[in-house]
Each structure stands twice: as structure tokens, then as C-alpha cells.
Amino acid sequence: MDLYGDDTEPVDGGEDLFKPEYKRYKRKDRKLDLSDVIDLTKQTNMDKVEEIELQASQHPAVRGLKPLKEWKNYSIKGFPGFIFIKNPFEDGQQRYWIERCVLDYPNKPSKTILDNLVDMSDIDNIWTYSQNKSNSDITGKDSLIMKLRWATMGYNYEWNSRAYYDEMKSSFPSDLHDLCRYIASAVGYHDFSAETAIVNYYHMSGDMGPHKDISEIDHDAPLLSFSFGQDALFLLGGMTKATKPVCLCLHSGDICIMYGDCRLVYHAVPRILPASQDILKHCYNFSTVSNSCENKITPEENGISCQEKLEVKSVGRQDVNWDLFSQYLQCTRINMNVRQVLPPGGTNIADYPKPVCPSQNGRGIKN
Ligand code: OGA
Ligand code: MN
């Protein structure tokens, strides 16, 4: 294992062109050169992308998303199957998902890294526990929430054997299932079943090494990946490391979809970067949420009425100390990474041979 990751798999097809790019963006001992990075917000390297249209989703719209016709979607030239949706959430609405990721999703029956580190038997809510214990130093080294690196829901990924098992399964949140089904349908996969998710919690020094996600039995369904909070550099490669990866800057609210030819390619997160305060304000600051309905979405296309929409807009979690919460978000990037595990109609993992997994060593956040 070297400093930059532990993926020592030989490169079929020639020289490793992935690792040098990963190192280049990860290393902190020289000035970071962002000149090759695709950034849809700053509009840099736009010649590497193409704007694409998605189709009308066959499922009811979900809370907090803009109408589909207002979304900005892109493909990356030379990387077919990768779809990038630039923050399709309404102003302020990401707060709902961020609160779910911090206040709810990591609690039982989900599995988290904390199960391996501390006795969790008396801790029902990691955030509340941390808030009460932290003496207002929520980002300090003794804060439990700062030790949270991943949580898994639905089929709980078993990190040692790199597999899913029928016996290792917790419930999957229906709100996240509906969100993913709506988005998957818009990219042409109409019966997506969200069966497992890993929620990754990165702090500013965190990264994720080069890997492929191949433990799922079904590889025809898309993989959906949501970014919230701080920015991340994301490397997208090919089926082998002989493909030079392209680097994208992901901002809060952005959605990456790995589908078709891109479902099984190498990817990595070499770097977390501070997000612009201006962008974050619009992403989850409650004060930016307008009180009017704005006539932006008709009930028919949205699936919820104007009145309901207003209610959604005014819901903020009362049990949260937002000051502490925003301190935590100030040094955190959250990634919800959602996959279908079984082929359509499948019910048991044991009915299928285990996928061969040579290349998942990099998976999991390192600090
Ligand atoms: C993963 C993954 C990417 C990200 O969890 O497998 O690749 O953007 N995450 O954090
Ligand atoms: Mn991955």
C-alpha cells in the first residue's frame, strides 16, 4: 500500500493513466492546478461536455426538485453512459436531504463505520448524541459525528468480502427510493429499485481511491450519486486504468449517473475543496427559500399541489441546532450513492453467483 491508495491491480492494456491523475489532484504539497477540470458552475472546459435532454419521468415528481424541463444535464465526450445533472433542486431544498443524511440515515437499522469503532448500543441518534456531548465543539476530534465516514442502508455492503448478503439487509428509506426512481426514469430506466445505498461523509482531508462498483448482481440499472455540502473533484475513467480519466468538480446538489457503458468504469474522489459560500447559501440556507409559489410548477407536472409545495418549503427540522449543523457542514461533503442490487424480478442474492470483484480496493473514504 502506498501513500496514494492501495489498489495494486495490474493494468490490463498498458500503462496506468489513472493513478498519476489521482495523485496529481490529491497531493497537497504543490499548488492545485484546476485548468483541466470540468466545472459546470464556473463553465470551464465546456468543450469536453455536451448538453443533453432527459425524458419525462414515468413516476410522480418528488419534493424539492425543479421541473424536469428546467434541469441542465450533460454527457462527457468520450465517456458514454455518464450523465451529469447540475443541481436540479429548488433553492433551499437540499436541506431536507442533508438533514436526512445526518439526522436519520446513519441511525439504526443502518450500519455505519461507528459500529466497528465504539459501543453503539445506547446511541440512537448520532447527531443528537454528538450535539449533547460536544460542548459546542461539534467539529472537534472527540465529536462522534466527525468519525462517521459511511453508513449503509438496504443491503449492507460487507467490506471484507466485498459482497451483499440476504441476511445483511436493513430497510431502505422510501423517500430516497422515490427520488432515485424518478431520476432513473428520466434517464430511461423506468423500474429502478433502490436496494442499497452508501452515504459517504467526507471531511476536508478525505478522499476515495480508484475503484469500480461491481458487487451488485445487476449492472444494467444505473448507479445514482448525489453530492451535498463541500465541493469534490471526481475522476471518471474507463474499464481499465489505461484510460486517462477526466476530472469534474462536483458541487452541492449535483447528481452523477453511471449507466450503460459507464456503469463499471474506474472512478475516484481525489480531493475535497471548500465550496463557495454563495452557492451553499442557495443550496440549503432556509432564508433563501421564497414564500411564494412562484407559479414555477403546475400541480400536474409536479404531482404535488401548490399548497403542499409551500408546506414542503416551510418544513425545517425543529430539533436541530442549525448553528452546530452548519459548522459540521462547513467541513463536510456528503455523497449518497444508490444502487439496484438484483435484476428485475429477483428476490434473493443467493440465487446468483457472486460477481467477481478484482477492483474495489479503493472503495471507502481515507483520511
Ligand atoms: C462510492 C463512490 C463517489 C463520490 O461510494 O462508491 O464512488 O462522489 N462515491 O463520493
Ligand atoms: Mn464508487
Image (cartoon, grey):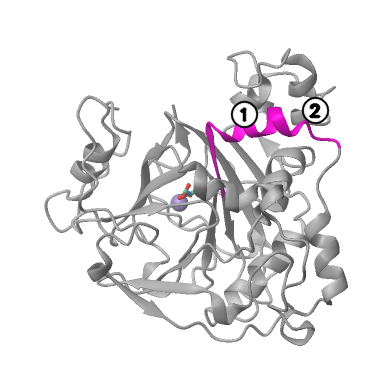
Q: Position of residue 30 (x, y in %)?
A: 19, 28
Circle 2 residue: 128
Q: Which mark is residue 327?
A: 1
Frontmost of labels 2 and 1 is: 1
Work out whether 8 lies above or below 260: above
| Stretch in magenta | 319-335
Instruction: Answer left or right for 169 relative to 159.
Output: right
Residue in front for this viewpoint, 53 or 168: 53
Q: Is residue 41 left or right of residue 128?
A: left
Which of pointers 2 and 1 lies earlier in the amino acid sequence? 2
User: Mark 2, residues whose alpha carbon is within 10 Å: few (<14), some, or many (≥20)?
Assistant: some
Cα distance between the residues tagged 2 and 1: 15 Å
Give the answer, above or below, for where 335 lies relative to 5. below
Q: Is residue 189 visible?
A: no
- The amino acid pointed to by label 1 is Gln
Indicate the secondary structure of the residue bearing disc 2: helix
Q: Residue at x 85, y 36 (%)?
A: 319
Q: Which residue is located at x 46 percent, y 57 percent?
A: 214
Q: In the rendering, at what x and y percent does residue 158 appear?
A: 59, 42
Q: Residue at x 28, y 61 (%)?
A: 238
Front residue (pair 29, 81):
29
